[in-house]
Image (tube, rainbow, N blue to C red):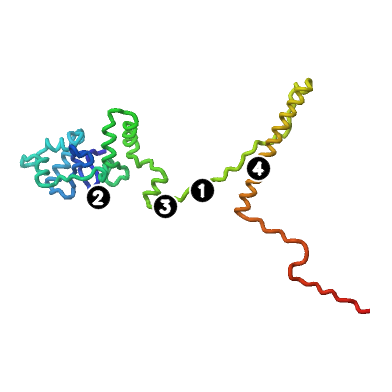
Amino acid sequence: MLKHVGLHNAQKIVIVLNQMPNEEHMCLVTYQEKLPPRYYNAVMSTLNSPEGQAAKDFATALEGAKLEDDRNLAKVLYTEGHLKKVPANQVFATPYGYQSSNKIKLNELNEYMKKIEQGGDALKKLEEFDENKGYHGKKKKDDLTETAGIPIAPTPTPVNPVVAKPVPEQVSVPASVLTDPKSASNELRTQGDNLRAVALQLLKQSKILTEKAETMFPTQPKRKKGRPVGSVTVVKSKTK
């Protein structure tokens, strides 16, 4: 994992300041491939140093770095125009490598960093980012489809048929029914009502499934009895 690196418009950058003073939506970066070789070597050496990785903002480490001619590295980069302000929402932090799909927008990272001291959800999400090597490590299928530019087809509404209770194979008669006629009448009435409710549910389910089947594959109309329309039967009369 390497801090303070990212991409802007597909170009490799070093993130010097995550947020500009009084312009929190902007950040300060330097484009690696546009640096002169000796500046590039000095920047990358500082970036990979313990001081560079420990710094909250890379600018702090740059201010303490010097070139071979003893010039201050941060001042040289600023004076010669190698530091650029860009919108933070256009920058992707790539701590796991430029080629990795595990990246996060810098403005989102800044927001999480603000709330990190509060713990809770912000801290948990940053921990997940580190454990899963990026939020994109566990993308949902719909997100992947949208990223690929493939239109997502609407999910058809399933038909929920009425689920009827199973019909009991045998009606059990409690022992109290055999000794108390009044109890027997109540028990049998209750069981009869239950069986009647089950029958009604089955009829309702059958009707729904039949209508669904007709929409999928209509039944061919039955042919009426009798001769086909247009047929003529010629009756010859017998001559006497």
Question: Marks 1 and 3: CB-CB under 8 Å?
Answer: no
Query: Where is mark 3, residue-wise?
Result: 151
Q: Amino acid at mark 3?
A: Pro
Question: Marks 3 and 4: CB-CB under 8 Å?
Answer: no
The alpha-carbon separation of the residues under discs 4 and 1 comes to 23 Å
Q: Amino acid at mark 2?
A: Asn
Query: Where is mark 2, residue-wise?
Result: 9
Query: Where is mark 1, residue-wise?
Result: 156
Q: Residue at x 27, y 33 (%)?
A: 113
Observer-side mark, 4 or 1, equals 4
Question: Marks 2 and 3: CB-CB under 8 Å?
Answer: no
Q: In the image, is 95 to the left or to the right of 83? A: right
Q: What element does badge 1 sit on?
A: loop
The alpha-carbon separation of the residues under discs 2 and 3 comes to 25 Å
Quarter of the view holding residue 188: top right
Q: Amino acid at mark 1?
A: Pro
Which percent across, then down, holds residue 234? 82, 74
Label 1 environment density (alpha carbons within 10 Å; few <14, some 14–19, many ≥20): few
Q: Residue at x 84, y 74 (%)?
A: 235
Going from N to C along the chain, the mark reached first, 4 or 1, is 1
Q: What element does badge 3 sit on?
A: loop
Q: Quadrant of the N terminus?
A: top left
Question: Marks 4 and 2: CB-CB under 8 Å?
Answer: no
Question: Marks 4 and 1: CB-CB under 8 Å?
Answer: no
Query: Where is mark 4, residue-wise?
Result: 204
The alpha-carbon separation of the residues under discs 1 and 3 comes to 15 Å
Which percent across, then down, holds residue 58? 18, 37
Observer-side mark, 3 or 4, equals 4
